[in-house]
Amino acid sequence: MKEDDATILTIELSIIFNDNCFILYQNYIVNLYNSKLLKQISLIIMSFNQNLKKQCLIKNNRLCLGLDLDNKWLKNDSLDYMEGFIKDIISATIDLCPIYKINFAFYERYGYKGYKILEKIPSFIHNKAMTIADAKRGDIGNSSKYYAKAVFEHLNYDSITVSPYMGFDSILPFSEYENKGVFILALTSNSGSDDF
């Protein structure tokens, strides 16, 4: 690859948000060697960043609240109680919190009942904060296209975490949505991250 057709971009989450927002507990770093993909992601990052920066400025903080709820630790482990608990957390924090990170695994384990809760979370937030679908998706182009459609159009989340393991075509469908954020995993904090 010639130097002029390759663009390398390294982004940490703190830089993505123009140093005005938050740093998640994991560092997301991406090296992009495809100029078309870089341009698309750059435009999306700008739009997403503008929205996020606005939320952070309005609420005067950089708080990201993780809704990674394991209901076995609640006093009642029913899904109805879990949903009410999540709604109460959002109601109690919505005036302070600019962004919520929802780890899909905690909901998907319950099948369609968990998906119903995932569907409701953006409506609980009601555009008063930004949402990260911490779903770590990544598959061949067609599959990624439908993952993106599910998360951005059906579930209505503002951003998503994706795994680049399968290459650029696994990321591209997510980057084609204007005003949506894409967090690309490259270096994570788990103990097995040194395996690759």
Image (spheres, helix red, strand yellow):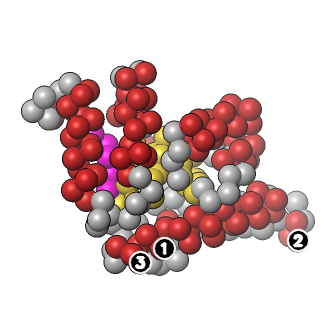
Side (left or right) of 49 relative to 169: left
Residue at image location 18% in from the left, 27% down from the top: 77
Q: How many angstroms separate mark 2 from mark 1 (CA)?
A: 32 Å
Tag on residue 57?
3
Contact between marks 3 and 2 (CB within 8 A): the answer is no
- Mark 2 or 1, nearer chain start: 2
Q: Quadrant of residue 36?
A: bottom right
Residue at the left extreme, as displayed? 75
Residue type at mark 2 is Asp
For discs 3 and 2, the disc positioned in front in the rendered view: 3
Q: Is residue 16 visible?
A: no
For discs 2 and 1, the disc positioned in front in the rendered view: 1
Residue at image location 76% in from the left, 64% down from the top: 39
Q: Main secondary structure of the magenta part?
A: loop
Neighbour tally class for label 1: few under 14, some 14-19, many 20 plus, Cα within 10 Å:
many
Q: Which residue is mark 2?
A: 4
- The location of residue 101, given as percent across then percent down, is 39, 51
- The quadrant of the rendering that contains the N terminus is bottom right
- The quadrant of the rendering that contains the C terminus is top right
Q: Quadrant of residue 141?
A: top right
Q: Which residues are magenta?
A: 65-69
Residue type at mark 3 is Leu
Q: How many angstroms separate mark 3 from mark 1 (CA)?
A: 6 Å
Q: For the residue labelled by badge 3, is the local secondary structure a helix, a strand or a loop?
A: helix
The verdict on residue 196 being magenta is no
- The location of residue 137, given as percent across then percent down, is 56, 39
Tag on residue 53?
1
Contact between marks 3 and 1 (CB within 8 A): the answer is yes
- The location of residue 152, given as percent across then percent down, is 58, 44
Side (left or right) of 184 relative to 109: right
